[in-house]
């Protein structure tokens, strides 16, 4: 890469108008001396959050020429070599010498594609009067290299697809308290959210384009973030595993059962390969594996984990949408609502089920989720689990989150909350 090419890119990125964006709940700090890092699945909105941050800086009077924005997946930068990263500073200094001694703001998108980027960022942080913002699509890559090279210099934020509150904002909707018609609109919006998912571009797209966009997303994630990045030797096996995970949100994941099923289907694999591929899916932010709510490390390791996809709509290109249970999508939405805020989450399985335990060490909320509980077996499972928990964890709130309010009588010590209301009102902590 030549310095002259960089000058064209920097000039272009300084002169264009910021793309129109809808504000997200996450707002990055503007005055920290830490390197601010955004990680998350592709197309979850990380770049738009950078644009919003640049817009906020401009409103505070920061000149656009002090902001260096580079997307390292721009084909004009590829392939960039480690020694060429210094050309960024040289090109900017030659373009804007009047800003050479003023504070700079670096915005580096998809930084993980640049070789030895962590050493460059460390030196930039230590030697420049600068605020640095990074995005990346690989938890494993960024976490490992940030931990070893940028220890103490970083603050990291996870970016997820849209929450239900953000989905409403993207659709131009707002709940009006004490309005029955507004309540009905919120319930309808939740049904739409569970059908469409939370990927920003998909939410804003015309309905007939959504399947194509989702297919492109899944293909991009599969080939670039999985096969190419991890140099996967058996793409067919990984594709089948991806299909299995994305088509069954909120289900218990048993690697042994998957191994047995795949072997019966004619796949040649070892258990080590299966665990490694599951690790790839988790480290690429595609799935989350919720542990059983046990203090014992041994029991957590022995019990199956509950699988949640980062966005249930990613399963649509792999299996028909009606095949993905609506109640399971709702349970994943409740899980992701909490996962955006904290990681100390678990579940209880066996004869009595609790879908989500907030803070297993000192349970704060015990949450069961059901779209409808009209059938006796569903009522017994969801309500029975919460009633059992009253003697086991008496201080925790016991909450039944439902798509539709039930006609049956629910014990008074169990809170029954409509799902749309819970997703808008549930606090980050319930101490």
Image: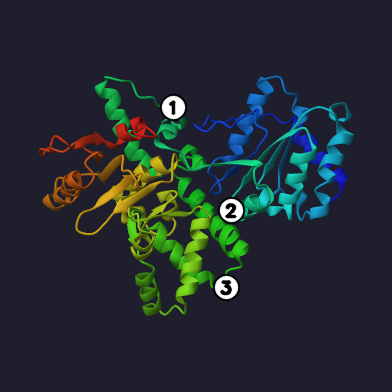
Tell us which disc is closer to us: 1 or 3.
Answer: 3
Q: Residue at x 58, y 61 (%)?
A: 223
Q: Are marks 3 and 2 in contact (CB under 8 Å)?
A: no
Q: Is residue 15 left or right of residue 420?
A: right
Helix, strand or loop at mark 2: loop
Whether residue 9 is situated above or below residue 182 in the rendered picture:
below
Tell us which disc is closer to us: 3 or 2.
Answer: 2
Nearest the eye: 2 or 319: 2
Which of the labelled discs sits on residue 233, or is there none? 3
Nearest the eye: 147 or 6: 147
Tell us which disc is closer to us: 1 or 2.
Answer: 2
Residue 333's image quarter?
Answer: top left
Counting from the top left corner in percent of width and height, residue 142 is at 62, 51
Nearest the eye: 251 or 349: 349
Instruction: Please tell me which of labels 1 and 2 falls first in the chain.
Output: 2
Q: Residue at x 48, y 73 (%)?
A: 272
Q: CA distance from mark 1 to mark 2?
A: 32 Å
Which of the labelled discs sits on residue 172, or is there none? 1
Nearest the eye: 303 or 46: 303
Counting from the top left corner in percent of width and height, residue 43 is at 55, 45
Q: Is residue 203 left or right of residue 141?
A: left
Kindly identify which residue carries mark 2. 138
Counting from the top left corner in percent of width and height, residue 128 is at 79, 36
Residue 94's image quarter?
Answer: top right
Q: CA distance from mark 3 to mark 2?
A: 19 Å
Helix, strand or loop at mark 1: loop
Instruction: Please tell me which of labels 3 and 2 falls first in the chain.
Output: 2
């Amino acid at each position: 890469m030549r310095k002259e090419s960089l000058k064209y890119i920097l000039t272009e990125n300084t002169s264009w108008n910021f793309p129109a964006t809808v504000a997200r709940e996450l707002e990055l700090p503007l005055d920290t001396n830490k390197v601010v890092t955004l990680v998350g699945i592709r197309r979850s909105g990380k770049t738009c959050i950078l644009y919003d941050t640049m817009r906020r800086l401009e409103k505070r009077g920061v000149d656009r020429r002090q902001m260096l924005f580079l997307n390292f997946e721009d084909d004009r930068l590829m392939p960039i070599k480690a020694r060429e990263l210094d050309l960024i500073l040289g090109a900017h200094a030659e373009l804007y010498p009047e800003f050479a001694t003023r504070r700079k703001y670096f915005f580096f998108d998809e930084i993980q594609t640049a070789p030895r980027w962590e050493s460059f960022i460390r030196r930039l942080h230590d030697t420049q009067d600068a605020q640095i913002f990074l995005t990346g699509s690989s938890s494993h890559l960024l976490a490992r290299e940030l931990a070893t090279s940028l220890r103490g210099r970083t603050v990291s934020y996870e970016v997820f697809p849209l929450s239900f509150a953000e989905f409403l904002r993207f659709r131009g909707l707002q709940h009006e308290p004490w309005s029955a018609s507004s309540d009905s609109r919120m319930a309808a919006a939740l049904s739409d959210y569970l059908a469409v998912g939370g990927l920003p571009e998909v939410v804003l797209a015309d309905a007939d384009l959504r399947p194509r966009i989702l297919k492109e997303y899944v293909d991009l994630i599969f080939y670039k973030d999985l096969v190419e990045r991890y140099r996967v030797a058996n793409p067919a096996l990984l594709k089948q595993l991806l299909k299995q995970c994305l088509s069954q949100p909120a289900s218990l994941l048993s690697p042994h059962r998957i191994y047995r099923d795949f072997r019966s289907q004619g796949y040649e694999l070892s258990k080590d390969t299966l665990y490694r591929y599951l690790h790839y899916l988790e480290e690429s932010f595609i799935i989350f594996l919720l542990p059983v709510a046990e203090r014992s490390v041994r029991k957590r390791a022995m019990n199956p984990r509950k699988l949640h996809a980062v966005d249930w709509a990613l399963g649509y290109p792999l299996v028909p949408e009606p095949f993905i249970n609506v109640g399971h999508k709702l349970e994943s939405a409740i899980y992701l609502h909490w996962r955006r805020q904290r990681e100390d989450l678990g579940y209880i399985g066996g004869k009595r089920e609790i879908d989500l335990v907030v803070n297993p060490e000192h349970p704060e909320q015990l949450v069961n989720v059901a779209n409808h509980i009209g059938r006796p077996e569903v009522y017994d499972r969801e309500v029975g689990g919460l009633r059992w928990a009253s003697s086991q964890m008496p201080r925790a709130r016991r909450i039944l989150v439902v798509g539709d309010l039930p006609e049956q009588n629910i014990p008074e010590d169990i809170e029954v909350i409509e799902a749309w209301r819970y997703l808008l009102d549930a606090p980050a902590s319930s101490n």
